[in-house]
């Protein structure tokens, strides 16, 4: 298993835990929390694979994903009180996850011979759609629709990756730089409360 595969599994687990925590905070029942945990973990990759015609989708063809997701959800139920105290740590894993999933989505799209803009869309889908589904099902405004920098970090990192790929830069170097860029942009935005301009509409 290489570093990117390990990060992929870790990000999937983090997203599953994130979805389950959100559901438990909304006081949903066992089935509801499990469903949202699974959707959060696989939603982005599922939509990406369906759009590209890559079926069966990744988590169906590789049972390891499903086992890890179920284990993550189960452990969240058991150790909920302890895990909730680590929410900031989980945010870091979530940030690592969006960096990894952005690359995975872009790389899969490149293999399919898609254009650079569409590769970017596939990378963004992998990274953020699961979170959108989680927030929507929990009756929250999805995080990417807030003014804070989240999807923008994925777009910036994805752009860097596509440029490095175009010039034939070493794959592992490109992956590392992209993940670090996304993590740095996201964490700096949180630390210094950076955000995109908020659109205000006059009522006159």
Image (cartoon, helix red, strand yellow):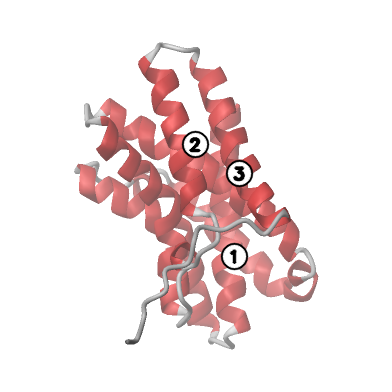
Could you say which disc has been placed on residue 185 in the image? 3
Query: For mark 1, what is the residue?
Result: 18
- Verify CB contact (< 8 Å) between mark 3 and mark 2: yes
- The residue depicted at 54 percent of the width and 82 percent of the height is 30
Query: Could you give the CA–CA distance between mark 3 and mark 1, rounded to whole angstroms?
Result: 21 Å
Secondary-structure class at tag 3: helix
**In this picture, is 195 found above or below 3?**
below
Foreground residue among 167 and 175: 167
**Quarter of the image that includes the N terminus:** top right
Query: Could you give the CA–CA distance between mark 1 and mark 2, rounded to whole angstroms?
Result: 22 Å
Q: Does any portion of residue 137 appear in the rendered image? A: yes
**In this picture, is 199 found above or below 99?**
below
Neighbour tally class for label 2: few under 14, some 14-19, many 20 plus, Cα within 10 Å? many
Secondary-structure class at tag 2: helix
Query: For mark 2, what is the residue?
Result: 157
Neighbour tally class for label 3: few under 14, some 14-19, many 20 plus, Cα within 10 Å? many
- The residue depicted at 64 percent of the width and 52 percent of the height is 189
Foreground residue among 197 and 39: 197
Asked if residue 93 lies left or right of residue 49, the reply is right
Foreground residue among 38 and 165: 165
The percent position of residue 142, horizontal first and vertical second, equals 45, 70
Quarter residue 136 falls in? bottom left
Query: Could you give the CA–CA distance between mark 3 and mark 2, rounded to whole angstroms?
Result: 9 Å
- The residue depicted at 54 percent of the width and 68 percent of the height is 19
Neighbour tally class for label 1: few under 14, some 14-19, many 20 plus, Cα within 10 Å? many
Asked if residue 180 lies left or right of residue 130, the reply is right
Q: Earlier in the sequence, mark 1 or mark 2?
A: 1
Secondary-structure class at tag 1: helix
- The residue depicted at 41 percent of the width and 11 percent of the height is 168
Outermost residue, left side: 53
The percent position of residue 3, horizontal first and vertical second, equals 60, 29
The nearer-to-camera label among 1 and 2 is 2
């Amino acid at each position: 298993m290489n570093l990117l595969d390990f990060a992929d599994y870790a990000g999937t687990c983090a997203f599953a835990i994130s979805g389950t925590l959100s559901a438990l905070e909304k006081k949903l029942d066992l089935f509801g929390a499990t469903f949202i945990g699974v959707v959060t973990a696989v939603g982005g990759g599922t939509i990406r694979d369906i759009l590209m015609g890559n079926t069966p989708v990744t988590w169906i063809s590789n049972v390891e994903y499903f086992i890890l997701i179920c284990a993550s959800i189960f452990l969240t139920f058991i150790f909920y009180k302890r895990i909730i105290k680590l929410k900031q740590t989980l945010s870091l894993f979530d940030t690592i996850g969006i960096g990894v999933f952005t690359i995975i989505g872009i790389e899969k799209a490149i293999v399919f011979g898609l254009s650079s803009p569409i590769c970017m869309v596939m990378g963004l889908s992998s990274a953020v759609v699961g979170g959108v589904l989680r927030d929507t099902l929990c009756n929250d405004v999805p995080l990417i629709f807030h003014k804070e920098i989240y999807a923008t970090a994925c777009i910036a990192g994805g752009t860097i990756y596509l440029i490095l790929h175009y010039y034939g830069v070493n794959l592992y170097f490109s992956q590392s730089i992209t993940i670090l860029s996304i993590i740095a942009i996201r964490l700096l935005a949180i630390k210094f409360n950076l955000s995109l301009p908020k659109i205000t509409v006059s009522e006159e």
